[in-house]
Image (cartoon, helix red, strand yellow):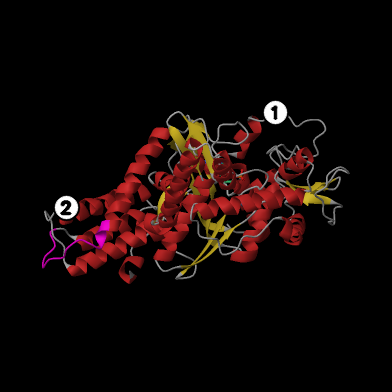
């Protein structure tokens, strides 16, 4: 593994729009920040795809032997319904609608987020900080930006002055926009707006009396602007300049552009060496989003209870489906694509199950060392998981041919094959070994089938007390029986 660690890893940097050779600031160490979820609703599969892309990247860095400090925040304040600094806080709005404390909303959806990520076999980040836990740090940054002349205070709110910043820096360099174009494309400022220019963004917003999520500050009671939390938390845990900042493509503008502006205003230099953006998951060709209703929740896919799906799919199959696309490509989800992924996943796992049993010979008829290097090469080329998967299927083909004694493998190559398959399938792609995870569930399914059989017999004997007892007690355990014309099916 040491030899492959030193191979060049190339990463597509959104800032330059090019693939660049990756060079960490401190040899052997990586600092990576990824914008986390706004916890005001259940995560949908689109959100999961972005976080999964970075989970895979985190996993690959670990395989290469890097010590990674991976910071993924929780946005629990400051994210307004409207990107132009208007409207309610998303969490406060949900709290009002559901008559809950905002922190109850935060707790509920943070727990949901963690549960879903665990089902998908995510590795936990090194630090998972919250916006509300870093209000003091955010206030300090605002003071600094004000002192340096890049922001102004109006009536208890503080705004970042994009025009002043753009005189000495380049606002728009990440998203490839020019401030002049943005200005000519925007409507005049609304008469009631406090901003000097529509492009300015809030660092601190005054809290109106009805706004519950509020903190004291030098400018009066209020709350931080959304972009500020990521600058505060990334600087605190990773420093003024760190290696990697990631997020979904839709965060490039304005969120990440504003993060760059804030950090450059404070420190005079760029905060991030490599900006990585994961592309969107679409459903029926349209971006998956909760707000439009064009979304699937992870639990709906695990149970099959969604009109877009003909059946349930396991978290590993969904994960395998996501990994079959490069993280920078748009991926459209459909029932057919999931069915095809399930077939592929089963084939891969079957080959891994058979690996131990394949016989060894004095010679190998396939170059397993070159194949191992090609697996690394795929991932070293901007984490190209679809090419990696194609390589894994070359190994599947070899395993099947060796079993049929049409090809041969030496003991040494068998260890290379086993180690490489395990590293990439389980450690990097994060798929779970069906034999480990499903052994228990297969037995459980067998037990439920036995109970269905006993219930059928009870009903035939008109022993309805027993049949109802079986049904009700299973229901209490979360196992639902459904009687249909072709017999009884169940859902765990
Ligand atoms: P949010 O909770 O809205 O702040 O989003 C959390 C993360 O999910 C962000 O990185 C978004 O870019 C990402 N995201 C939102 N919708 C999608 C989608 N349809 N496909 C992939 N990522 C998404
Ligand atoms: Zn962020």
Q: Nearer the viewer, residue 396 or 55?
A: 396
- Relative placement, left or right, of 49 versus 407 is right
Q: How many marks?
A: 2
Q: Residue at x 60, y 31 (%)?
A: 292
Question: Which residue does the numbered mark 1 point to in the structure image?
Answer: 187
On whether residue 356 falls in the magenta region, the answer is: yes
Q: Secondary structure at mark 2?
A: helix
In the rendered image, residue 189, in percent from the top left (x then y), is placed at 75, 32
Q: Residue at x 46, y 40 (%)?
A: 457
Q: Residue at x 80, y 35 (%)?
A: 193
Question: Which residue does the numbered mark 2 point to in the structure image?
Answer: 401
In the rendered image, residue 279, in percent from the top left (x then y), is placed at 48, 42
Q: Secondary structure at mark 1?
A: loop
- Determine the main secondary structure of the stretch shown in magenta: loop
Marks 1, 2: nearer the viewer? 2
In the rendered image, residue 420, in percent from the top left (x then y), is placed at 30, 62
Decide which of tag 1 and tag 2 comes sooner along the chain: 1
Q: Nearer the viewer, residue 257 or 121?
A: 121
Q: Nearer the viewer, residue 343 or 234?
A: 343
Per the rendered image, the range of residues in magenta is 354-365
Q: Residue at x 70, y 28 (%)?
A: 187
331 is higher (above) or lower (below) than 245 = above
């Amino acid at each position: 593994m040491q030899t492959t660690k030193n191979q060049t890893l190339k990463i597509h940097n959104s800032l330059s729009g090019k693939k660049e050779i990756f060079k960490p600031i401190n040899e052997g160490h990586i600092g990576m920040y990824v914008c986390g979820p706004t916890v005001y609703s259940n995560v949908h599969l689109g959100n999961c795809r972005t976080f999964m892309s970075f989970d895979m990247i985190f996993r690959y860095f670990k395989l290469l032997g890097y010590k990674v400090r991976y910071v993924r925040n929780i946005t629990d304040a400051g994210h307004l319904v409207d990107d132009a600094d208007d409207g309610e806080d998303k969490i406060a709005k949900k709290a009002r609608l559901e008559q809950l404390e905002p922190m109850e909303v935060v707790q509920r959806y943070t727990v949901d987020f963690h549960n879903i990520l665990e089902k998908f076999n995510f590795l936990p980040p090194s630090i998972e900080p919250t916006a509300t836990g870093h209000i003091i740090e955010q206030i300090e940054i605002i003071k600094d930006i004000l002192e340096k002349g890049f922001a102004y205070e109006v009536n208890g709110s503080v705004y970042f002055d994009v025009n002043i910043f753009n005189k000495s820096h380049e606002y728009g360099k990440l998203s490839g926009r020019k401030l002049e174009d943005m200005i000519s494309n925007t409507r005049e400022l609304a008469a009631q707006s406090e901003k000097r220019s529509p492009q300015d963004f809030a660092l601190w917003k005054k809290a109106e009396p009805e706004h519950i999520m509020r903190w004291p500050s030098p400018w009066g009671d209020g709350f931080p602007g959304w972009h500020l939390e990521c600058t505060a938390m990334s600087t605190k845990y990773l420093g003024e300049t760190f290696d990697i900042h990631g997020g979904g493509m839709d965060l490039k503008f304005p969120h990440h552009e504003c993060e760059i502006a804030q950090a450059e205003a404070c420190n005079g230099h760029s905060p991030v060496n490599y900006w990585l953006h994961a592309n969107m998951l679409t459903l029926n060709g349209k971006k998956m989003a909760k707000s439009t209703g064009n979304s699937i929740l992870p639990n709906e896919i695990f149970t099959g209870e969604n009109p877009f799906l003909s059946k349930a799919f396991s978290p590993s199959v969904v994960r395998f489906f996501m990994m079959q696309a490069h993280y920078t490509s748009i991926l459209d989800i459909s029932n057919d694509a999931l069915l095809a992924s399930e077939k592929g996943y089963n084939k891969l796992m079957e080959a891994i199950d058979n690996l131990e049993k394949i016989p060894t010979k004095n010679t190998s008829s396939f170059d397993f060392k070159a194949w191992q290097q090609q697996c690394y090469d795929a991932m070293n080329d901007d984490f190209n998981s679809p090419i990696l998967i194609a390589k894994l299927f070359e190994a599947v083909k070899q395993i099947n041919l060796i079993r049929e004694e049409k090809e041969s493998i030496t003991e040494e190559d068998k260890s290379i094959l086993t180690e490489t398959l395990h590293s990439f399938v389980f450690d990097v792609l994060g798929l779970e070994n069906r034999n480990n995870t499903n052994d228990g569930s297969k037995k459980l399914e067998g037990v439920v089938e036995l109970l269905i059989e006993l219930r059928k017999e009870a009903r035939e004997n008109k022993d309805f007390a027993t049949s109802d007892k079986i049904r009700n007690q299973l229901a209490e355990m979360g196992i639902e029986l459904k009687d249909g014309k072709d017999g009884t099916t169940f859902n765990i």
